[in-house]
Amino acid sequence: MPTDPSPALPDDATLLAFIDAATGLNGIPLDPAWRGEVLANLRAIGNSARLVLSFPLEDEAEPASVFTA
């Protein structure tokens, strides 16, 4: 079985530092009571991304066609 090439998620302290930095840089006020909820959502997004990245694709795989009217 191949190893998972996607990187591990950072620990909670690192993610909380990222949340604080991102909200501060973007001028988004964040009630401290919501930091845990934001962390949980960030973890869920990271876990979803790891799932998608772990799916093996052959070199011949191509993106689906896009049709517009």
Image: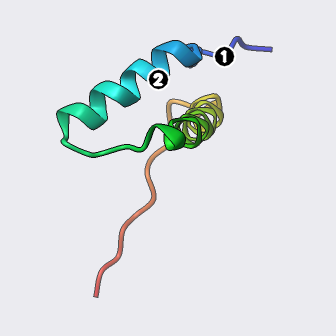
Q: Give x and y (percent) for residue 22.
A: 29, 32
Q: Which residue is mark 2?
A: 16
- Horizontal side, residue 55 vs residue 66: left or right: right
The numbered dot on residue 28 is none
Q: Secondary structure at mark 2?
A: helix
Residue labelled with disc 1: 4
Q: Secondary structure at mark 1?
A: loop
The span from disc 2 to disc 1 (Cα, nearest Å) is: 25 Å
N-term mark: 2 or 1: 1
Label 1 environment density (alpha carbons within 10 Å; few <14, some 14–19, many ≥20): few
Foreground of the two, 22 or 34: 34
Report x, y in % for residue 61: 51, 41
Q: Nearer the viewer, mark 2 or mark 1?
A: 2
Query: Which percent across, then down, holds residue 37?
Result: 58, 43
- As drawn, 44 above or below 7: below
- Rendered residue at 73%/13% (across/down): 2
Q: Is residue 28 above or below residue 56?
A: below
> What's the amino acid at mark 1?
Asp
